[in-house]
Amino acid sequence: MFQIPACLPKITLNFTLTLKKDPKIIYIEFNYAITYFIPQLYDLLTFQIQSTQLSSDFYNLTTISDSTVEFKYIANQYIPPLALLTATFQVDEAFNNDPYQMFMVGESQTIQMKEIYPFSETETAVIVVMVGLVFAAVLSNASIVVSTK
C-alpha cells in the first residue's frame, strides 16, 4: 500500500475545554473529528493540575462523539476551587511536518476547575439523603403556602 503526500494545506486541529455540572468532568471538544487519534488518546493527551503532571491512573477518558472526549477525574484527592487544569495534545515533533498527515496539532488549553472534595461513600450517601429531605421540606412548605392563599 502506497501513501501519497497531502498537497493541500494542513488542517489545524484545536480543542477547547468545557466544565460540566459535575466538577470532576470536563469535556475536550475538538474542531474536527478525531477518530484517527482515538486509539492513542491516553498516549497523546497529558494533563496537569496546578503544574503537577497527572498519572493516567487519576482520570478516565471516554469518547462522547467523534469530536468530543470526556475527561473524568477519578482520584480521591482534594482540588481547591479555581485550580488550573492544563490539557496538552502531544505529538512527536515530526508529526506536524509529516507530508502524509492531514492535521497540524495545536498546543494546549487551560481551564479553571471547580472545587473537588473527596467525599467518602458514607458522606456522599448522607449528603444525598439530606438534600432530599431539604428538597421535600421546601416543596411541602411551598404547597402549604400555595394552598392557604
Image (cartoon, rainbow, N blue to C red):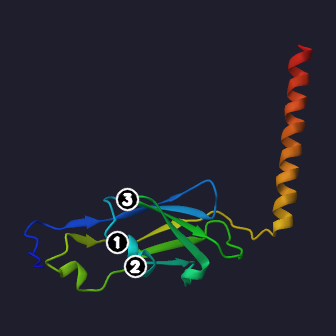
Residue under pointer 1: 37
Front-most of residues 1 and 95: 1
On the image, which quarter does residue 40 sit in? bottom left
Residue 131 higher or lower than 117, as above or below: above
In the image, 39 versus 73, the foreground residue is 39
Which residue does the numbered mark 3 point to in the structure image?
Answer: 66
> Circle 3 sits in a helix, a strand or a loop, which is it?
loop
Q: Amino acid at mark 2?
A: Leu
Q: Residues within 10 Å of mark 3 (few under 14, many from 20)?
A: some
Q: Residue at x 69, y 67 (%)?
A: 116
Nearer the observer, disc 2 or disc 3?
3
Asked if residue 122 lies left or right of residue 114, the reply is right
Give the residue pinned by disc 2: 44
- Is residue 148 depicted above or below 7 in this figure? above
Residue 124 percent location from the top left of the image: 81, 61
**Which image quadrant for residue 141?**
top right
Residue 66: x percent and y percent? 37, 59
Contact between marks 1 and 2 (CB within 8 A): the answer is yes
Give how far apart the Cα atoms at labels 3 and 1 are: 10 Å
